[in-house]
Amino acid sequence: MVLLIISIFILLCNGASGDKIYEKQLEARLSLGDRTYEKQLEARLSQSEADIKDLQSGLELMNQQNKQLLAELKAQNTKEKRLLLPTSSHQQYVAFTAKLNKQYNSLNDRETVIFDTIVTNAGQGYDENTGIFVCPISGYYQFAATVVSEDGTDKNLDAELMHNGRQIVRLHATVYGYDEGTQVVNIHCAQGERVWIRHLMGAGDSAIIPAGFSTFSGALLHADQ
C-alpha cells in the first residue's frame, strides 16, 4: 500500500514537471513567433517607407515638369497676345511711296533724284524736299524704285539705290523710250541711316527723266527687338 502511494506521488511529480517543460517550450515558440512577426512587420514597414520615398520623388519630378510646362505655355500665350496686338502697340509702322511729278532735263552724275510727290509717308521717314529716306527705327526694310527713260533721246537711263553712301543695286532703262528700270531689295537699316536714289551719268546715258512715271517706295518689314 505504501509502495502504491509512493508510485502515485512520483507519477504526479513527473506530470507536473512535464507540464512545466511544455509551458516553457510553448513560451519559447510564442516568443520566436513574435520576433519573426516583428521582423516581418519591420521589413514591410521599411518597404513601405521606400515606396513612399519613391512616390515623393515621382511627385517632385511631376511638379517640376508641370512648372516647366506652365512656363512654356505662359511664354507662348504672351507671344500670341503680342502678335494679336495692334501694330502700333508693339512696332512702329513705317512705309512710304513717292512719285516723280516733275521732269528732270539736265541731271548731273550722282545727283539725287528727288521724288517730289508723297503718296504715303507713315513714320515720316521720307523727305520730299531732299529725296532722302531716313530710317526712323532700326530693322529690316524693303525698298523698291522704278525709273523711266525719256522717249526720243536714244540714250540709256541709269540710276542707283544708295544706302548710307553705298550702292545697293543699279537701275537701268534702255534707249527705247519709256522703258523702265526697276529694283526691289531687302536690307537692314539702322535708325538714322539714309536711303535714296541717285542718277548715274555715263557717256551713253541720258540726263532726262520724264514726269509722272518713276517711283520710290520703302516699308519696314520687321523692327529690331
Image (cartoon, grey):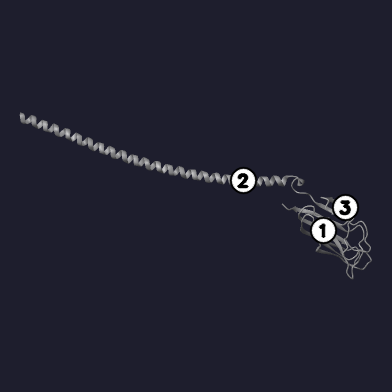
Which of the marked residues, 1 or 3, is nearer the chain's N terminus? 3
The local crowd at label 1, few if under 14, some if 14 to 19, many if 20 or more residues have their Cα within 10 Å, is many
- Pick out the residue farthest to the front: 192
| Residue type pointed to by label 3 | Ile
Kindly identify the amino acid type of the residue bearing the numbered disc 1.
Answer: Val
* Disc number for residue 195: 1
Question: Does the residue at mark 1 contact the one at mark 3 (Cβ under 8 Å)?
Answer: no
Q: Which mark is residue 118?
A: 3
* Quarter containing the N terminus: top left
Label 1 – label 3 distance at C-alpha: 16 Å
Q: Which label's residue is closer to the chain start, 1 or 2?
A: 2
| Callout 2: SS | helix
Q: In the figure, residue 206 lies in which quadrant?
A: bottom right
The mark total stands at: 3
Q: In the image, is 78 to the left or to the right of 174?
A: left
Front-most of residues 11 and 72: 72
Q: Residue at x 61, y 44 (%)?
A: 70
> Mark 2 highlights which residue?
71
- SS state under label 3: strand
- Residue 84, how many percent across, how many down? 72, 45
Q: Nearer the viewer, residue 193 or 59?
A: 193
